[in-house]
Image (tube, rainbow, N blue to C red):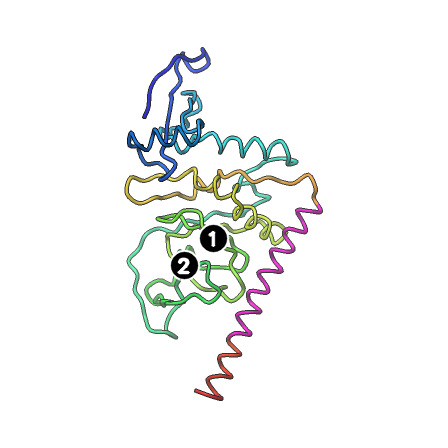
């Protein structure tokens, strides 16, 4: 629902009053859903200055709780920057679409999709042809240890930190890669984006009538707080990298156990 109401001179005399259905982000509310949403929370109906629209008329982008998150971060952090800040990242990469040529195991680069980034040893791995896709793999698709991955199509905002055993693998164009400025911030960035606040700041950018999407430009604009307690930020980063290293250790031990089982029993 969009309606015009009187506003201030700052926005040329008009505000937009917006409402959204909390059960499906960005979806128009049916009358029954609207009534139920109002019973659940009065914040589901709100006004936005035209000067603050930023080209977005979808109500979910302007949901008040997102601005409250940003205000909270600004009040409690030393500063709030964005993913694009050179202190945070060197690049944000969204590969282009392409027709994939798969090959048998041992003849190509391991290739994973968004559904698999939460797995230690992704199942149903495919192998992308190095003959057909070598340049694209090197320029866009290749994963490197301690990159942050974000799903950007369909399911939005799943976050993963690339472990050592994924180094050199490739991932689909439905995953955005954040190349960290250095290992001094790689773990902290991934942890923040994995929090409830981080996910909301990513998902607010969702667009698409049929398939939900976000793009690399929007990810570059996601706010990231730099903590007043620098020691705490350093410790968060160190713990995240240590946990990621243990994922590689767990993978190695699991592979060793499977090898012993296969040789001794199977």
Label 1, label 2: how many angstroms apart (C-alpha)? 9 Å
The stretch of residues the image draws in magenta is 231-254
Q: Is the magenta stretch mostly helix, strand or loop?
A: helix
Tell me if I can see residue 130 in this picture: no
**1 and 2 marks in contact (CB < 8 Å):** yes
Residue under the image location 71 percent in, 47 percent down: 231
Residues packed near mark 1 inside 10 Å, few (<14), some (14 to 19) or many (20 plus): many
Q: Is mark 1 on a helix, strand or loop?
A: strand
- Of the numbered discs in the image, which one, if any, rests on residue 149? 1
Q: Where is residue 211 in the image (x, y as percent from the top left)?
A: 31, 45
Q: Is residue 240 magenta?
A: yes
Decide: is 82 above or below 99.
above
Decide: is 98 above or below 41.
below
Q: Is residue 63 left or right of residue 186?
A: left
Q: Does the magenta stretch include residue 197?
A: no
Could you say which quadrant of the image residue 18 lies in? top left
Could you say which quadrant of the image residue 213 lies in? top left
Residue under label 2:
171
Q: Tell which of 239 and 21 is nearer to you.
A: 21
Q: Is mark 2 on a helix, strand or loop?
A: strand
Q: Which residue of the protein is positioned furthest toward the bottom in this rendering?
A: 264
Residue under the image location 56 percent in, 46 percent down: 192
Decide: is 239 above or below 165.
above
């Amino acid at each position: 629902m969009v309606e015009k109401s009187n506003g201030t001179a700052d926005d040329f005399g008009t505000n937009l009053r917006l409402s959204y259905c909390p059960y499906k982000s960005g979806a128009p509310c049916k009358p029954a859903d609207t009534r139920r949403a109002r019973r659940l929370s009065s914040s589901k109906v709100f006004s936005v200055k035209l000067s603050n629209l930023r080209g977005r008329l979808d109500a979910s982008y302007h949901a008040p709780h997102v601005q409250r998150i940003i205000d909270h971060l600004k009040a409690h952090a030393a500063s709030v920057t964005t993913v694009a800040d050179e202190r945070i990242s060197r690049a944000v990469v969204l590969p282009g679409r392409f027709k994939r040529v798969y090959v048998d195991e041992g003849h190509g680069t391991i290739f994973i999709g968004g559904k698999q980034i939460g797995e230690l040893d992704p199942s149903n791995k495919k192998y992308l042809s190095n003959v057909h896709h070598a340049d694209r793999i090197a320029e866009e698709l290749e994963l490197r240890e301690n990159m942050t991955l974000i799903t950007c199509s369909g399911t939005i905002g799943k976050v993963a930190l690339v472990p050592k055993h994924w180094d050199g693998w490739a991932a689909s164009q439905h995953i955005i890669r954040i190349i960290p400025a250095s290992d001094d911030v790689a773990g902290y960035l991934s942890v923040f984006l994995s929090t409830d606040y981080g996910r909301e700041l990513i998902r607010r950018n969702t667009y698409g009538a049929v398939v939900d999407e976000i793009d690399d430009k929007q990810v570059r604009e996601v706010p990231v707080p730099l903590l007043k307690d620098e020691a705490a930020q350093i410790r968060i980063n160190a713990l995240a990298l240590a946990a990621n290293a243990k994922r590689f250790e767990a993978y190695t031990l699991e592979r060793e156990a499977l090898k012993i089982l296969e040789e001794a029993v199977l």
